[in-house]
Image: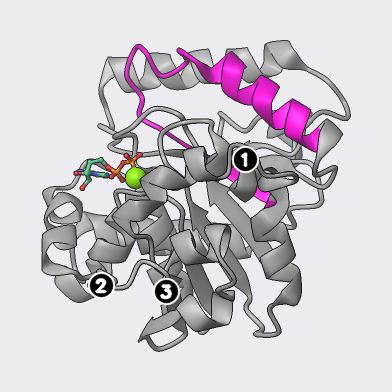
Amino acid sequence: MRSIATINQKGGVGKTTTAVNLSAALARMGQRVCIIDLDPQAHASLHLGLSPADSSLSTYGVLTGDVSLEQARVQVAENLWVVPAHLDLAAAELELAGEVGREIILRDKFAEDTAEFDFLILDCPPSLGVLTLNALTAAKEVFLPLQPHFLALHGLSKLLRTLELVAKRLNPTLRLTGIVYCMYESGTRLAAEVSSDVQDFFESLHASDSVWNRARTFNSRIRRNIRLAEAPSFGQSIFDYAPSSHGSEDYQALALEVMGFDPTLPAPRENESASASSLTFVD
Ligand code: ADP
Ligand code: MG
């Protein structure tokens, strides 16, 4: 089983859109997928048509109460389940402030869960607080959605330091395995420049056994596509809302790429793989 957290402490970069549509694509390809919505804004849950009335049957109840993942989990499509979020989750940070081991609650709940999935996808809020720490402690992989604009790198060192600390203190298996460009405007100079800055940034970090030495930039860029922005208000994934859109095409391609690599191996070097993009990060 693979467990992937979509992380970026910036809002509006495509974390939720990626968590939801990548999950839906994987589910349609026959993979059993469960999304864990860790954002109090519950965008991933709403995107899939869920809005739990009872806050205990949500990630709030899972993190602050005795509720199991199984009790809170809802099936939304063939092969696709969601543990939804509730607005009350916003209070979890404070409520858990004095609790010993508050960063490992989700990991313990994962360990108690007997259901089998091929993928657990954890959608995180735009902060590096206790909710995101629970995701980083429970997951093995991090995907970093980036919007290629000139502030894309801003705050990235802080994010990487957090990943490093979590790997050192709480979860030695954690690795940043994928960078997903979202809202990509192909052909623009800005997108090309930012992509090349991001590559330089990761290459400058150059460490052989670091949290990011397995990071790859996915060849599938998610193009800016209005259908992706419209789908959430219909409570549908892009595949139900606009199956022949660019958004649907791009997330299907991403899902194939995600299934096709071994997250325990470093990303291939540029000249070792014909399929590697010119932006593939080296270890
Ligand atoms: P985050 O979870 O990082 O805050 P979202 O996934 O919610 O970001 O995306 C922010 C906004 O941008 C949402 O309104 C979403 O519908 C829209 N959006 C995301 N990806 C795309 C895209 N490729 N094209 C157009 N709009 C997008
Ligand atoms: Mg989000």
Q: Amino acid at mark 2?
A: Ala
**For residue 151, side relative to residue 167 (left or right):** left
Identify the mark nearer the N-term, 2 or 1. Answer: 2
Residue for badge 2: 53
The quarter of the picture where the N terminus appears is bottom right
Q: Amino acid at mark 3?
A: Leu
Does the magenta portion include 226? no
Graded by Cα atoms within 10 Å as few (under 14), some (14 to 19) or many (20 or more), the crowding at tag 1 reads: many
Dot 3 falls on a residue whose secondary structure is loop
**Whole-percent x and y of residue 273?**
70, 43
Q: Residue furthest bottom?
A: 78
Q: Which residues are magenta?
A: 138-167
Rendered view: 18 above or below 203 = below
**For residue 149, side relative to residue 141 (left or right):** left
**Whole-percent x and y of residue 26?**
48, 72
Q: Amino acid at mark 1?
A: Leu
Dot 1 falls on a residue whose secondary structure is helix
Q: Which mark is residue 212?
A: none
Q: Which mark is residue 57?
A: 3
Q: Residue at x 67, y 44 (%)?
A: 99
Dot in front, 2 or 1: 2
Q: Which mark is residue 133?
A: 1
Q: Is residue 1 visible?
A: no
Q: Is residue 81 visible?
A: yes
